[in-house]
Image (cartoon, rainbow, N blue to C red):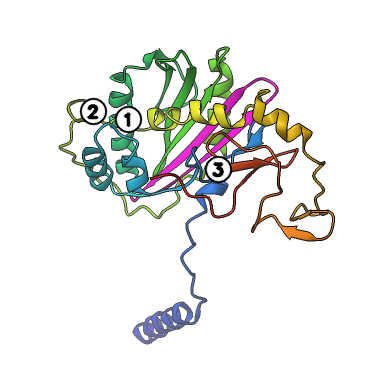
Amino acid sequence: MRRARAALLSMLGLCLIAAGPEVAAASPPDLANVLIDPPSADFQAVPNGGSGKFGPQDADAIASNSTDGAAAKQRLTKDQFTRGYEKGWVQQSTGLVLVEGAYEFKLNSGARDYFSASKSGDSSNSDFKGFFDTPGLSPAYGAHFKSSDGFPSDAVVFVKGNLNLVVVMGNRSGVDSSRVLAQAKAQFSSAPANTLPQPGASSSASGVNPLALGIFTGAVLVVAVLASVVALFLRRRTPGQAAAAAAPPLTLSGDGRYWWDGGGWHDTENSVPPGVQRSPDGAYWYDGSRWRLVPGWQPRP
């Protein structure tokens, strides 16, 4: 009887398991949503694409910014990089540029291995001016940079789970590293523990030497776009802007989708109003409150 009851309970347990609802694997989060908003509402978002090359990042896009693209691609492959995303903002009243990046790896160990390569590569960059402390974040490092034309920027690079995360601020007049660190801490708190399921402890053996191959990963890749972003999105008074100011006032529909030419409405996703201000590379036009990507714009080969 005892054996029969045990068998019955065992069968009942199997039936309950079989009848239970199937739990679908959660989809990985959108990395664009993993990155947090700027510290205040007066930052203007830089549109994806164009000179800043913001938006989704694959291994080829990241490797193309390296001093040795083939070596960078090898590093990303060894560390099992899966995808990335970068965003940029400009505070036009001060000229402060904020760039954030999230880089996903299949395993936590890959993210940490890439982090180590990033730190080594950044410290050997000619623009590198020294590290600063990042209390409250680990593993993490802060780095000061100044480009050859004197543009300073500070970066905090850190790891959370299988993500490498980067926060960079740059300004011609200088950067307060405590502001960069505060934004990085907020990003760390907001980011998920992992974006991909982790099978357990795993080692990441990489034979790539970041110093020998000149791979400047992490912060340096993002810092490289700061100068171009400033040139594009700081509204300085130029002859082109004077002409734009003399152009007829721009009338947009309530939802901002259409512009009025005096006789009919036109879709901003298909055409650009005549006489509006454009960025130096022609990739963006200004609608009076924000920059928009020119429909069909392609960079010059």
Q: Residue furthest left?
A: 207
Label 1 and label 3: CA atoms lie apart by: 31 Å
The C terminus lies in which quarter of the figure? Answer: top left
In the rendering, at what x and y percent does residue 199 appear?
32, 54
Q: Which residue is mark 2?
A: 214
Asked if the residues shown at circle 1 and circle 3 are in contact, with their CB atoms under 8 angstroms apart, the answer is no
Magenta stretch encompasses residue 96: yes
Which residue sits at x=49%, y=19%?
A: 153
Label 2 and label 1: CA atoms lie apart by: 10 Å
| Three-letter residue code for mark 1 | Ser
Q: Tell me, yes or no, if residue 3 can be seen here.
A: yes
Which residue sits at x=38%, y=49%?
A: 58
Which is nearer the N-term, disc 1 or disc 3?
Answer: 1
Q: Nearer the viewer, residue 28 or 65?
A: 65
Mark 3 residue element: loop
How many numbered discs, if any? Answer: 3
Which is nearer the N-term, disc 2 or disc 1?
Answer: 1
For the magenta stretch, what is the residue range?
84-106
Q: Which mark is residue 118?
A: 1
Nearer mark to the viewer, of 1 and 3 = 3
| Three-letter residue code for mark 3 | Ala
For label 2, the crowd category at 10 Å Cα-Cα, with few meaning under 14, some 14 to 19 and many 20 or more, is some
Asked if the residues shown at circle 2 and circle 1 are in contact, with their CB atoms under 8 angstroms apart, the answer is no
Q: Nearer the viewer, residue 52 or 31?
A: 52
Q: Which residue is mark 3?
A: 283
Which is nearer the N-term, disc 3 or disc 2?
Answer: 2
Q: Name which quarter of the figure residue 118 lies in.
A: top left
| Three-letter residue code for mark 2 | Gly
Q: Tell me, yes or no, if residue 185 can be seen here.
A: no
For label 1, the crowd category at 10 Å Cα-Cα, with few meaning under 14, some 14 to 19 and many 20 or more, is many
